[in-house]
Amino acid sequence: MRLFLSSYRFGVHADRLRALVGEPGRVAVIPNACDAWPQFWEAAIASDMTPLRALGYLPEVLDLRDFIGRTAELEQRLAEFPMLWVRGGNTFVLRAQFARSGADLVLPRLLAADTLVYAGYSAGACLLTPDLHGLETSDDPAEVEPFCGIEPLWDGLGLVDRPIVPHLSSALDPEGTCDRLAAQFRANGVPHWGLTDDDAVVVDGDRVEVLRGPS
């Protein structure tokens, strides 16, 4: 299993993502964490396409809503790509769309077979944790039902063993909700990865490494 999980895009570790993937090639960009914000959906995609292309990747949008009830087709489609790029947004909306499309069943199989690299930031990283409790302080679970038609799910995919708290000391979180969640986890003795926007977690087989930005 190969994972690149960050707070914001590549952090300062784009080189480590490339080392996981090999030569840049096609990338499936999954933007569904933004499904509750249709007015910003296209702009959100464009904001990721540009930096991916600048690093030599060939991004293509893969909308999970196109595969609801078509899980086998989704698995075949995902298997065409050496890398998935799962952007930030609302973690609960992203989790719901993974469930509706069957991506939550397909992805673990593909990762176990090591057919692709999963790269996700913010919501795209938090999705892989065991439990989403605590993220409601920054992501609104009430956005799920109007846009996904199901109740919010509170379990993550469980592909890593602890919560991820992104955007520590970040301009993207001006109210400091992520810092407060990390402080709560520390006070309660909950193992977690707190990430600034420079940081990333890399999983390569049995090896797990937390990459920090400059001090």
Image (tube, grey):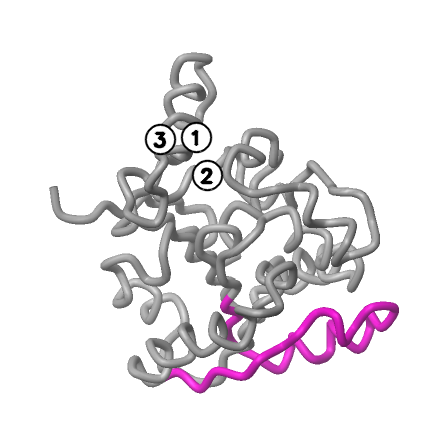
In the picture of the structure, the residue carrying the numbered disc 3 is 179
**Residue at (62%, 58%) from the top-left corner?**
112
Q: Which residues are magenta?
A: 57-85
Q: Position of residue 160 (x, y in %)?
A: 53, 42
Q: Quadrant of the C terminus?
A: top left
Label 2 crowd (10 A; few <14 / some 14-19 / many >=20) = many
Q: Position of residue 201 (x, y in %)?
A: 37, 48
Q: Position of residue 48 (x, y in %)?
A: 42, 73
Q: Quadrant of residue 17?
A: bottom left
Left or right, 10 with reference to 131 = left
Q: Is residue 125 above or below residue 38?
A: above
Label 1 – label 2 distance at C-alpha: 6 Å
The answer to whether the residues at label 1 and label 2 have Cβ atoms under 8 Å apart is yes
**Residue at (70%, 42%) from the top-left corner?**
142
Q: Nearer the viewer, residue 10 or 88?
A: 88
Label 1 crowd (10 A; few <14 / some 14-19 / many >=20) = some
Left or right, 134 with reference to 192 = right
The answer to whether the residues at label 3 and label 1 have Cβ atoms under 8 Å apart is no
Marking on residue 192: 1
Helix, strand or loop at label 2? It is strand
Helix, strand or loop at label 1? It is loop
**Residue at (26%, 67%) from the top-left corner?**
15
Query: Magenta stretch: residue 81 in it?
Result: yes
